[in-house]
Image: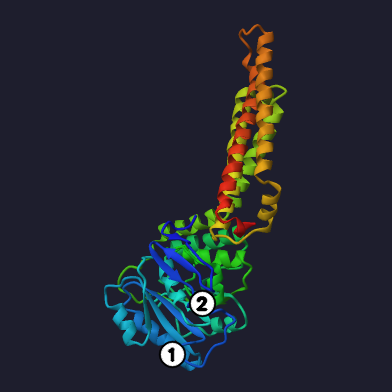
């Protein structure tokens, strides 16, 4: 459900959290709590401006100078951190010459660069923005103001602030960004109109609590989704997007990165991926099957009989599997820290413990075996000769379905207990 390069290995002891990205451990101990008081020196700044960087020598100095100008003009005590993703064009030397602090990121990826950079930040607040000069780092006042008011996450909104000609491909402007933002609002009720804006601010404490882990472009969606699910305070400010100042093509790959965003949101929303489709299939299958159990049904010139009954049973079976996957994926996401604990799921776990799953499964298996036994008895009364399929299948299909569902319930109960066993204290 998260990027395979990222796995949480860690520890929350002595106020320290760690996260492994590949074989490298990121430590969160340097991230200041949002309630910490800002000191009076550069070691403890109020604001850290993070710039992810991969071969941005053409625009990096411009971005740093604008950020420095903002800090000076607005008298904000701050630092500039360039989180370098393995540049080979001298970007690191440019950053150091301009007075920025460089963090070398050993793992490739937009999300990896921002996780490392933010974990090394010393500021009470953090503002991240691309180092291609598409965002104006001299115009960060609205972000700082909202953060000082107590907002945990402040999102830029390019749809409100304006997109200059040539700054965004048409498919991103009219398809990708509106579609992904709408899906985020539907799936998670996120109060954000521009999911993909790269200019955003957040408190250091909120960053630590969110425990972000995706390494790619889906990092942008992960931050918003987790902030929403954790009931953090989110605000938006208008942001202008300008054409980037580079002569080369951008790193962004619209279709691939768009799919990664959508994939992440689907995997973090078991309701829409599994629960709702599963419920629809189960209900449709049960209603159709129940109407065909007494006998064939004729609708106009079409007669529905045991063939439709068979496929309605398949629909129930597949739908029930989807419902089980909804429970499994939600449980996994909670135990792995991808999603925060859910009270409804906690109540579900208390009601449906392993023994309850076993009892329900045993009842369904018994019902299926009972139906099968009745069918054999009926066959015996007919002298074990030929039977009319339209009659016997009306008994065999529901019996087989009940037997299959009962076995699934028993096996699923054990698997769910196994999922919860490793970190039971986190989800109960």
Measure how far apart labels 1 and 2 are at the Cα level. 18 Å
Query: Whole-percent x and y of residue 350?
Result: 69, 51
**Which image quadrant for residue 63?**
bottom left
SS state under label 2? loop
Q: Earlier in the sequence, mark 1 or mark 2?
A: 1
Q: Tell which of 389 and 248 is nearer to you.
A: 389
Q: Is residue 13 above or below residue 358?
A: below
Query: Whole-percent x and y of residue 262?
Result: 50, 56
In the image as oriented, which residue stretches furthest toward the right?
Answer: 294
The 10 Å Cα crowd at callout 1, few under 14, some 14 to 19, many 20 or more, is some
Label 2 sits on residue: 239
SS state under label 1? helix
Is residue 132 visible to the viewer in this orientation of the structure?
no
**Which image quadrant for residue 369?**
top right
Q: Is residue 368 above or below residue 110?
A: above
Taking the spot 45% from the left edge, 56% from the top edge, the residue there is 259
Query: Whole-percent x and y of residue 143?
Result: 54, 81
Is residue 145 visible to the viewer in this orientation of the structure?
yes
Query: Whole-percent x and y of residue 113?
Result: 40, 70
Taking the spot 62% from the left edge, 34% from the top edge, the residue there is 405
Instruction: Give the label, 1 or 2, closer to the camera.
Output: 1
Label 1 sits on residue: 69
Q: Tell which of 417 and 102 is nearer to you.
A: 417
Q: Tell which of 11 and 249 is nearer to you.
A: 11
Disc 1 vs disc 2: Cβ atoms closer than 8 Å?
Answer: no
Q: Residue 270, which numbered label? A: none
Q: Tell which of 159 and 47 is nearer to you.
A: 47
The 10 Å Cα crowd at callout 2, few under 14, some 14 to 19, many 20 or more, is many
């Amino acid at each position: 459900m998260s990027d395979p390069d990222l796995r949480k290995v860690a520890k929350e002891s002595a106020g320290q959290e760690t996260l492994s990205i590949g074989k490298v451990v990121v430590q969160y101990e340097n991230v200041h709590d949002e309630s910490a008081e800002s000191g009076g020196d550069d070691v403890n700044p109020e604001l850290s401006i993070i710039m992810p960087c991969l071969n941005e020598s053409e625009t990096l100095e411009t971005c740093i100078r604008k950020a420095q100008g903002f800090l000076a003009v607005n008298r904000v005590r701050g630092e500039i951190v360039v989180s370098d993703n393995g540049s080979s064009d001298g970007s690191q030397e440019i950053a150091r010459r301009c007075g920025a602090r460089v963090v070398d990121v050993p793992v490739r990826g937009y999300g990896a660069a921002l996780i490392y950079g933010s974990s090394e930040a010393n500021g009470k607040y953090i503002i991240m923005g691309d180092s291609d000069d598409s965002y104006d780092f001299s115009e960060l006042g609205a972000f700082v103001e909202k953060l000082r008011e107590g907002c945990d996450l402040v999102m830029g909104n390019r749809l409100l602030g304006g997109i200059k000609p040539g700054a965004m491909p048409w498919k991103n402007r009219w398809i990708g960004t509106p579609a992904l933002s709408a899906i985020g609002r539907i799936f998670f009720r996120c109060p954000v109109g521009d999911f993909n804006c790269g200019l955003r601010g957040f408190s250091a404490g909120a960053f630590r609590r969110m425990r972000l882990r995706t390494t790619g472009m889906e990092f942008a969606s992960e931050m918003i989704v987790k902030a929403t699910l954790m009931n953090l305070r989110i605000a938006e400010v208008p942001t202008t997007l300008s054409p980037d100042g580079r002569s080369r093509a951008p790193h962004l790959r619209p279709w691939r990165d768009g799919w990664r965003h959508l994939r992440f949101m689907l995997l973090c929303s078991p309701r829409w991926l599994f629960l709702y489709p599963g419920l629809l299939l189960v209900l449709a299958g049960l209603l159709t099957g129940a109407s065909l159990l007494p006998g064939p049904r004729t609708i106009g010139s079409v007669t529905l009989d045991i063939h439709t009954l068979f496929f309605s049973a398949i629909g129930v079976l597949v739908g029930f599997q989807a419902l089980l996957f909804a429970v499994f994926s939600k449980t996994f996401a909670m135990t792995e820290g991808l999603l925060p604990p859910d009270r409804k799921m906690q109540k579900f776990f208390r009601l449906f413990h392993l023994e309850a799953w076993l009892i329900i499964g045993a009842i369904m298996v018994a019902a299926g075996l009972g139906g099968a036994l009745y069918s054999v008895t009926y066959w015996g009364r007919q002298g074990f000769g030929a039977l009319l399929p339209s009659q016997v299948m009306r008994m065999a299909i529901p019996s087989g379905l009940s037997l299959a569902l009962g076995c699934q319930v028993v096996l699923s109960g054990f698997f769910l207990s196994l999922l919860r066993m490793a970190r039971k204290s986190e989800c109960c």
